[in-house]
Amino acid sequence: MENKLTQHQSKTIVFLPILYVVWSDRTLSNQERLTFKSFIKAIDWLDEEEKSFLFSRLEPDSPPSRTEMEDWYFTIRRFIHEEQDFESLSAMGIAILIGQDKELSQTLDLDRIQNQLKKLEIELGIIGQSAIYLFKSEHPTVTTTHSTEKVFEVEELAKFLEAGQGPIIERVKKIISRSSFAYVDPSDLNFYRNQVLEWCKIIADEGLGKIGYPKEVGGDGDMEAYFSVMETLSYHDLSMVIKFGVQFGLWGMSIYSLGTSRHHKKYLPSIGTLDLPGCFAMTETNHGSNVRGIETTATYHHKDNSFVIHTPHEKARKEYIGNAAMHGKMATVFAKLIIDEKDYGVSAFVVPLRDDKGKLWPGVSIEDCGRKMGLNGVDNGLISFDQVVIPREEMLDRFSSVNDRGEFESPIASDNRRFFTMLGTLVGGRIGIPRSALSAAKSGLAITIKYSDTRRQFGPEGGEEVPILNYRMHQRRLMPWLAKTYAGQFAMQYMTQRFLDRKEEEMQEIEAMAAGLKAYVTWNTTALLQECREACGGKGYLSENRIDALKNDTDIYTTFEGDNTVLMQLVAKSRLGAYREQFENMNFFTILNYVASKTKTSLTEKNPLIVRNVDEAHLLDPDFHRNAFEYREKDVLDSAARRLRRLIGDGMDPFDAFNVCQHHLVNVGKSYIERLVLEQFNAKVKEVEDRSFGPVLKKLYDLFALSLIEENKGWYLEQGYVEGVKTKAIRKMINQLCWEIRKDAVPLVEAFGIPDSCLAAPIAFGR
């Protein structure tokens, strides 16, 4: 059949744009066909031959051929120009009719025809403006034109994030950027473990292993630098970081924190150079988080001034001990001190594992834990002791000792306080791990955001494909995590300073804070990296793009240095008044009486105007954020205390009462930590209001605050603190903030200053 649509003096050409659009996906529904046919039958400005032709072009069994569709397309393009703007396909059809035959068009009522065609468009469900772009080479929508900008000085923000640690951070970056630190295939377990050891030796040779040790034993006495080193190393290989942390942190710092000067002089110099690789042997198979329940014994024999270290059964073995399977020569072993058959609780001892030739010490048995989900460059092992004899001097005796008469001594009278003072030595690890986790989170975000800025997919009809970072849902997936990562950075800097400037009377608070932040940051890292993996699609699944290593290596972060759920309960107990001398042996009833006397019985009345306020200025007001976070923290704590008191008052055993309320207690910990993180983020924003990056940092803060309120909106709605109209407004504001921060996202991850060699991800560089 002759293609009358493109023939001279054919009025059917006015239908050309609409027909092209309805056939553009090669299918025409029955409803569309009936609607179109009814329209053609009703109009009076086509003759029967023209109507018959149009009917023939609406048959589903004989759709237009590819050649015919191309003919239609090029005919449309021949009669319209790029600079022409059409409000509808009907207007475009009229323009084509005029362009084809001006004389014919003058005989027709074009306004009437266009209005009729516009109704047809509506009935067919065609969105004219969108469809018009099928016929234009450019489609400059808001989505397509939104792109990365640099509105602040990246280097200025990078320096601010370094918090005065720039020189040591830069020094570490240069080391891990060397060719000797090129990534290796982790599939060969022995090779990988030895490579990790070699990397740690290089770091030790640079003097970075002993950087936190006191100057009198050859160190720099700079614990802040130690944490900065660990955090920066975490941009590289995380097995190396954990090996570093075990050797110079757990092993070395346990000697420093639990031992006295003779232990420091004897061990720290060789630990700091890695001439004496060692372990931190606390965890047992039967007793992971419950250190008090460990079963390894250290029995004192006064006649020869020695301890006998013994593992009573298989389930009491030291398990998952880093550095044990291959390289460790000695270990700090936590064991129950037994003197004259009396148990004096947990103390720490230095115990040999291997001689200088690598042969196991008599009575020591070590089994390799084997391959793990991640961190396979760390040689974890299970250690058991069979009557291993060590001299009395090898007891780390800062907090407990055995005197020359064979009697137990301690400068701390309370067994309970002594135990928790000793465990306070773990605080350093609970600072190092979340800081390492933040580096992994930054690496994942840098890879994903840079990839999303260059990876193009889909786009408007007739337009170019769009960077996936321009899609609102993609922004929703990533921008809140970017805000949470910045929030975590500032919170951990605050935590580090509190630890470094600590006073004895603040230690309980600092320990709880460190436990909570460790849990909060590592949980976030685990969830963030999963989102990054998914956001990179199949590319994120390829090992060469590093997200798999980051995910697998940090997965364990949520459970070592303390299981996160247990740690959050520890925070809750601290908030309830735990670790005080009058609460000997964790007498929960006494704790609750104390809390009940201190907790307010009523909270500030909720202002009816506030619960419905959706003004932008209010939603972005730090006072609103602070009040919301504080309200939740206080109310959750108050309700937990009242609930526990009621259960115990009704006759329930305190232990059972705490078990019933575990979920509630975890929320007590979370709400406290979230409020703390918010405060530190806001403090940093105030500090830089007049800096080039001040406005974008404020947006990140706003996004962080509103995202957490949204995450907890069910609770806020239950409490009547907000109404539905306000949660909807918060959701819209979050979407808008994600849209605005998108243009700053690449500069924001560039400010992390991650060396290119450490990203090592082709997709991060558009490859």
Image: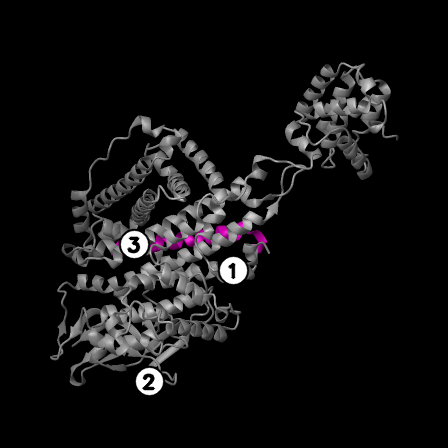
Per the rendering, the mark at residue 546 is: 1
Separation of marks 1 and 2 at Cα, in angstroms: 42 Å
Give the secondary structure at mark 2.
Answer: loop
Seen as rendered, the residue at the extreme right is 1
- Determine which residue is flagged by label 2: 362
Instruction: Examine the rendered structure and indicate whether residue 569 appears above or below residue 26.
Output: below
Q: Quadrant of the N terminus?
A: top right
Question: Which residue occupies 71% across, 18% down?
Answer: 116
Q: Quadrant of the C terminus?
A: bottom right
Task: Verify whether residue 531 appears in magenta.
Answer: yes
Separation of marks 3 and 1 at Cα, in angstroms: 29 Å
Disc 2 crowd, CA 10 A, few/some/many (<14, 14-19, 20+): some
Q: Amino acid at mark 3?
A: Met
Majority secondary structure of the magenta segment? helix
Return the x and y of residue 66 as percentages of the image width and height: 80, 39
Give the secondary structure at mark 3.
Answer: helix
Q: Earlier in the sequence, mark 1 or mark 2?
A: 2
Which span is picked out in magenta?
A: 511-539
Q: Is residue 288 left or right of residue 233?
A: left
Return the x and y of residue 465 as percentages of the image width and height: 63, 43
Question: Which residue occupies 46% across, 51% down?
Answer: 749
- Determine which residue is flagged by label 3: 495
Quadrant housing residue 329: bottom left
Q: Amino acid at mark 1?
A: Arg
Q: Is residue 567 left or right of residue 171?
A: left
Task: Identify which residue, 545 or 157, lies in the foreground.
Answer: 157
Q: Earlier in the sequence, mark 3 or mark 1?
A: 3
Return the x and y of residue 357 as percentages of the image width and height: 38, 85
Per the rendering, the mark at residue 1 is: none
